[in-house]
Amino acid sequence: MEDWTTNPMNAVTAGLAILVFIMIIWMAVIGRRLKKLRKQYTEVMGNTGVTNLEEVIIELKESLSAQEQQSKQFNQQLREMQDKLLRQKGKVGVVRYNAFSEHGSDLSFSIAIVDEERDGAVFSSIHSRETSYVYAKPVLKGESTYPLTPEERKAIADAK
């Protein structure tokens, strides 16, 4: 029997056998990595039915653009609603008083209806035994072009 040291062909054959064994191990490692990559690719692609990654990225970009546009529209609508809310005449102040201190009771009143900037109107009713008078005055920035009574000023102040 010859050993591999005396016959060079035996050494080459042994070397090739070792090389083939290493290549088989290397292919097994690469196969495992490929399987892992295939699994990750399937997870990324999901059930889109698209096998091209470029198409998926383009669809995602288009979807993101549409959502950004919708977000801008919602922000614009929100700003418009906030502006409308500030102009809403929802602040109310009521002051009851006795217009004639010598007789009667607190049957007269002033009501102010204004917005955040104190724009709106003030209504006053002066009640006496025989008659009642109702007045309305426009209010801009808490003031009116008509003289305001102390009760009307207090109603405006209470409304803010």
Image (cartoon, rainbow, N blue to C red):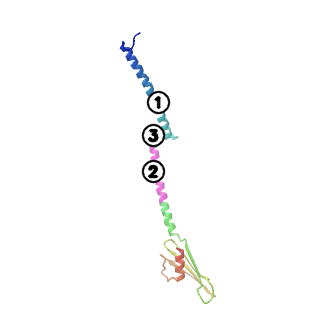
Q: Which residue is mark 3?
A: 53
Give the amino acid type for the residue marked by disc 2 in the picture. Ser
Q: Which residue is mark 1?
A: 31
Q: Nearer the viewer, residue 131 or 3?
A: 3
Q: Nearer the viewer, residue 92 or 137?
A: 92
Q: Position of residue 138 (x, y in %)?
A: 51, 78
Task: Evaluate if marks 1 and 3 touch, with contact meaning CB atoms under 8 Å apart.
Answer: no
Q: Is residue 54 visible?
A: yes
Q: Is residue 121 visible?
A: no
Total marks shown come to 3
Residue 49 inside the magenta-drawn segment = no
Q: Residue at x 48, y 62 (%)?
A: 79
Vertical side of 110 occupied by 42: above or below: above
Q: Which residue is mark 2?
A: 65
State the SS at label 2: helix
Q: CA distance from mark 1 to mark 3?
A: 22 Å
Of discs 1 and 2, which sits in the foreground? 1
Other-residue count near label 2 (Cα within 10 Å), few / some / many at <14 / 14–19 / ≥20: few
First reached walking from the N terminus: tag 2 or tag 3: 3
Residue 74 inside the magenta-drawn segment = yes
Q: CA distance from mark 1 to mark 2?
A: 39 Å
Give the amino acid type for the residue marked by disc 1 in the picture. Gly
Range of magenta residues: 57-75
Vertical side of 26 occupied by 132: above or below: below
